[in-house]
Amino acid sequence: MYNTKLILSLLVTLYAVIQVTIADDNCFLTTSTQIYNFNVLKNQTFTFTDSGKNIYYFNICGINQRCTAVNPNSGACQTGYESQMLSNCGIANQYVRPLANGAAGGSLLYTGGTSCKSGTISRSTTIEMVCSTGSTRVVSAVETSTCKYVITLDSPLACGTPVPITTTTTTTTSTTGSQTTGSQVTTTGGSTTDKNIITTTGSITNQAVSTTGSIGTSTGRISTSGSLSSATAQPPQQQE
């Protein structure tokens, strides 16, 4: 008895979770260029009568209240003109797919409907929500193959907004080093400077040379094949 109550409790909880899942999914579609929000169509109930006088009832991304008479989770159903029976044409979900022809908008696929043709086929409904101008309206409902229905809905609410463009800026700074000259550097020959290196084939007269390296190292090096002399004053000598 206890186990039976536990199982019933778990089933009730599972049903509630399923209901929340149907109600709380996103009903969005994001493509490489557009973001679509079909929640704006979610609370509308649609009805359409085809050329054969079959009546279709459906909701976008949600349960259709009339269809709950045949299944509590049905998102689309149909009343046949000849039989006058209400058939579940698919369980509601909110998983929007791109339109097959690449047009602006999105589509829903409701599956798991009432079986037909002696139970060999389950009814399903594709709802195509096409971006258009003017008012929201059902354009057509067609049985494309046995118990497979395609409903086309035109609406400006099925149009998307552009995906925001993200710009990334990369800054690269390159330097070969630094050289600080306190006064001046003169040479009687030619000199070249490369990566903080001063090279001369003549002589260098130095009044003040400051470098981040040391003389004789690969960074901040001063080399010469001539002479290196300094004009800096010498300290005075003491008188005897």
Image (cartoon, rainbow, N blue to C red):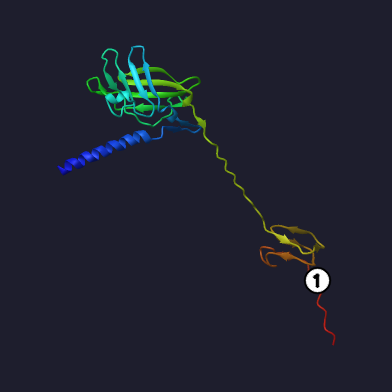
Q: Kindly identify the residue that appears in the image at 20 percent across and 42 percent down.
A: 6
Instruction: Please tell me which residue is depicted at 26% across the width and 17% down the height of the picture.
Output: 85
Q: How far across and how far down the image is residue 129, in percent?
A: 43, 24
Assess disc 1: are there few (<14), some (14-19) or many (≥20) residues with their C-alpha within 10 Å of its C-alpha.
Answer: few
Q: Is residue 38 found left or right of 240 in the rendered image? A: left
Seen as rendered, the residue at the extreme right is 239
Q: Is residue 100 left or right of residue 216?
A: left
Query: On the image, which quarter does residue 233 sit in?
Result: bottom right
Is residue 147 positioned above or below 219 on the image? above
When asked about the image quadrant of residue 189, the answer is bottom right
- The residue wearing badge 1 is 232
Q: Which image quadrant is residue 19 in?
A: top left
Label tally: 1
Q: Residue at x 81, y 77 (%)?
A: 235
Please, which residue is most extreme toward the left here?
Answer: 1
Tell me if residue 10 comes above or below residue 199 in the rendering: above
| Nearer-the-camera pick, 192 or 36 | 36
The answer to whether residue 38 is visible is: no
Residue 82 position, x and y percent, is: 27, 12
Q: Nearer the viewer, residue 45 or 200?
A: 45
Name the residue nearer the viewer: 92 or 166: 92
> x and y percent of residue 195 in the render?
69, 58
Residue ranking furthest to the bottom: 240
Q: Quadrant of the N terminus?
A: top left
- Which residue is at the front of the view, 73 or 96? 73
Split into 4 quadrants, where in the image is the C terminus? bottom right
For badge 1, the amino acid type reads: Thr
Is residue 188 rendered to the left or right of residue 88? right
